[in-house]
Structures are given as structure tokens and as C-alpha cells.
Image (cartoon, rainbow, N blue to C red):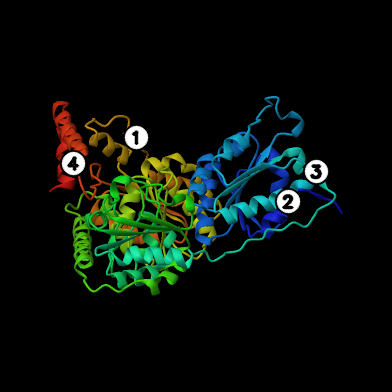
Amino acid sequence: MPKKVAKVIVETLQAAGVRHCYGVVGDTLNLIAHSISESEIEWVSMRHEEAGAFAAQGEALITDRLTAVAGSCGPGSLHFINGIVEANRNRAPVILIATQVVRDELGFDFIQEVDFKTIYGSISVYCDMILTPAQARRKTVTACQAAIAKRGVAVLIVPVDISHSDVDDDVPFAVHTSRPIVRPSDADLDAIAAIINAGQKITIYGGSGCRGAHDEVVRVAEILKAPIAHTSRGKDSLEYDNPYNVGMTGIIGNEAGYHAILKCDTLLLLGADFAWRQFYPDQANIVQIDIDPTHLGRRHPVTRGLVGDIKATLEALIPRLHEKSGTHFRDHYVKRHREVIASQKEKAEPRRRDTISGIYLTELIDRMAADDALFAGDDGTATVWMHRYATATPKRRFFSSLLHGTMASAMPTALGLQMAQPGRQVISLSGDGGIGMLFGDLMTAVQHKLPIKIAVYDNGKLGFIDIEQKSEGLLPLYTHLQNPDFGVVAQAMGLWGRTVARADELEAAIGEWLAHPGPALLNVKVETMTLVMPPAIEFGPAYGMALYSARAVLGGQTHDLIEMIQENFI
């Protein structure tokens, strides 16, 4: 008996491991939505498609499983675009079913006609249209296989007349994927071992590609007496149970990680594609290992770059490494990092009981959160405080828009994390600007009974942009936000909601917020002038901040300047 194309697509998605499909139902999506309702896939009704894409990438990343989003023709499928870019850059296996107007009207500027192939082709690992019913299963399989194997977003465009068509000859194509062990050849391993063994001051710099290779990286550091720095995306892979950890470098890093990398003579770069060239050493030998060959040497020149899975490659490399004896280089930066952490904890303690710093808020949440909590941070200061002040454990995971740098990703990503892991504590650290962008999808949490916990860092402005303008010597412009009381609004939407403005009330409020069985939003009025201090201050930003100070005084904004000094330097 013939099947509708829509049913064939859904059957293939289910066979490929899809458990949830996020979207907003529209007219051209109706038959696919009905086919999903008859399958084992659960439809997650979103208020905005962009939030659905963020949620899908959260689920795909935490489960390492294909996740789907689906949209109606024209604006419905276009709304996904920012979340799709985010998912693709994070290497999340996601498939977008983008429905299209009927084939007879394509090319005539028909109502809601959009050239999805042109738009999505550059931000996906696969993008194609089903042109005939006979192609339905084959192209759906190809899309699923591409998303899983290439680690990214696949876009399948489905004209509405195709989805309603019968498939008469359904050839049984199926998704086939495997996880091969990839490592360099013995000759290449010998070559990089020679470079590493010749080094005297060796530093390891690991990224998200080190996931699953924690023990091997620590073992290499033990042999080489090397400190281990990590990227922000490598935090939950390398920070925990690591006696050689020296933290992050970069703008949101610390001076220990910063100097351990810049002052080494040999840098072992593992699964890291850190973008900022000024934080790489210019005089060191750099050995880079990455599963993606396009990453080799693209950020900074390297001495030798090899393709390989980090765990498998290190397992083969370890017998070739010569054990070092001197520990002074490593010990110096490990000690320095411990001093940095102690200083950060001291800074987190509130100096006043009537105000709350974002740092103190983060430190308290970290202290009171579950050992296996999942954290999602909004781009900006919330993400900075999360990576600096939240403690990694073997079970915790941290998610943020570090590659795409988009606002508003935290809360909807938390929705997807909670759908995928219903028994775990999921915490969104949201900026007031970010939560305002996709605030409507708090109703998704209520509708689907997702007990996510949202902390809003309410400083009444776009904090990171405010800091950037000041560092350029500019008075802040267009960064002020006139916010509602997010706690009261959350209550009106059906969540537990509360607003806190005093440090002496915060700990009890966090305890109540985390203990609430359903979705809960804690709006925290945080200090407005807390700066993100980099590990090293260059002349340009320092001069810009001095210039801002002068302009603030001359412009009658002395109060802001005094507040900034009180919050950061006293």
C-alpha cells in the first residue's frame, strides 16, 4: 500500500534515532506534523522557531544523537536560521525539515516562496530538495547520514505537494554510520614525539576535541611535566580532577593559562581551534592534533599538524614520549592558577549586603547546584562568570554560544537539554538582554512542564557591549535596557518567579528557586558596573578606559565612574 512522502520522512527520522522534533506548526507542515504524532517522535511546540533550533542543538549535543526541527514554508523555516548557524558551528547533528511552496509555483516569486537552498547551503553540511516522491526516503537518509557523520546541520527542503504525494516504489534505503578510530600513522607519531621530546618547557592546550580523552591528556601532562590549559569549550572536558590545570587563556581567561602558553617552548595543541592569534606563542614549536584537517594551522602557524581523534592518538603517542624530570615550569603555573582561583573566590564574596555582583550570584549557584547539573550561559557577562566561577565535575556540562556569539541562546538551549535529560537539573544563566529576546518561550517550559531554572542577570543594560564601548574610550550608547520585573512577569506566565536585589537575601532565594519542582525564574538585580578583567591589559584598551573616565567626568557621569571603581577596584 502506498505511503505519503510525509510518513516516509518521519519513519526515516525515527529509524535514524530522532526522539524529538521542535517547531511551530504551519499550514504546509500539517501533514508532516500529523505523521510525527503517529510515530514515536515527540513534537515539541515552540513559541519561536529560533528557540526551537537552540533547543534542538542542546539536545543533540548532550545526547550525541540526531535531533529534528521542522518549519512551514517562507518565514516559518527562515525563523530557524540563527539557531541553525549556532548548531552547525557547534557540530550538533540536527536536521531541519523546511517545507516549501508547491513545485509548480517555484521560480515565480510566489507568496512565501524562499530559496532555502541558497540561504541554508552555506551554513549546513547538507542542503537539498526532494524533487519527486521516489526520492523521499533516499534524500532523507542522505540528510540524516550527513548530519550524523559530518557533525552539523542537514537541511531537507520538502515542497508541500511532495509531502502529500504517494510513494509507490519505496526502496529501503537506511542510515548507516560508524565511529572509526582515526589516528596518525606510526611515522607521523614518531615525528611529533621527536619534537615534543626535545622540548623543555612544554604546555598542553586542550579544547572541546578532548572530550572523552581526559585521562590520556592528564597522563601526557604527567609524563611531560606540562601544565594543562584549556579553551572555554574544553572546560567540562579537562578542568575536573586535573592536578595540572592552569585554566583558560584569552579575553575571559586568567594570567596563569595566558603565560603558561605564551612562555612555553613547545605547545601541544589538542582538539582546539582557538581563534585569537595574539594568545598563541610566536617562538614555540607547536604540534597540533585535530579530528578536522581544516583546523590544522589555520589560526596560527604550526610546526606539525596531524589528523586524529585525541584519545586514540594519545594512546598511541604515550609510549613514544620520554618522561621529563624537572617540574619547575609546570609547578610555577599550577601554583599561580591556584592563587588566581583563591583570589576569584575572595572577590566573589559580597562587600555590601544591599547589592549583588554577578560574580557572587554565579558562585552561589555553583555552590548550591547539583553535581551533575547542566548549565547554559547567555553570550556576554553571564557566560564569562559561568566559565570563571562555575566548578567543573565529571558529570557537569557547560553550554554557551562561544563560536557564534549570539544572544538569547541560554534559555532555549536549556529547554532542549531538559527534554533530553528529564531527570537532571538544568540551569540557564541568562542576561537581561538575552532573556528579553526570546522571552515567549518561557511558555514552552510551562506547556511542556520542563523544570528548567532560569537566573536572570538583571543589570539593566547590554553589559558586554557597555564594556566594549568603554574600552574604546566611548561613553556607553544605546546599551541601556528598560526592563520589566522579570520575576513578576514569570509568575504571570505560570512559572515560579521572584526578584532579589540584596546580597543577604540571595542564598535563601537560590535555595527556594532550585528546590521548586517546576520551571522557575529568579530575577537578580546585579551591580551594573562590574568589569570583565582580561589576563593581561594591553595599552589600547587601558588607554580607552582612561579616555572613557575623562569623558565621563567631563560629561557629568562621575557617579558611574565612582560606581565602577567601587565595584572593581576597592
Give the residue pinned by disc 4: 564
Image-quadrant location for residue 489: top left
The residue shown at (49%, 54%) is: 292
Q: Which residue is mark 1?
A: 482
Point 80% across, 43% down: residue? 165
Q: Earlier in the sequence, mark 1 or mark 3?
A: 3
Depth order, front residue of 535/407: 535
Q: CA distance from mark 2 to mark 4?
A: 60 Å
**Residue 189 x, y percent position in the rendering:** 43, 66
Q: CA distance from mark 2 to mark 1?
A: 51 Å
- The residue indicated by pointer 2 is 138
Q: In the drawing, does residue 18 fall left or right of residue 210?
A: right
Q: Residue 33: which numbered mark, if any?
A: none
Which comes sooner in the sequence, label 4 or label 1?
A: 1
Q: Is residue 432 above or below residue 194?
A: above
Question: Which amino acid type corresponds to the residue marked 3 in the rendered image?
Answer: Ser
Residue type at mark 1 is: Gln
Q: Tell me the element at label 4.
A: helix
Which residue position holds label 3? 165
The x, y position of residue 354, in whole percent, is 20, 50
Q: How many marks?
A: 4
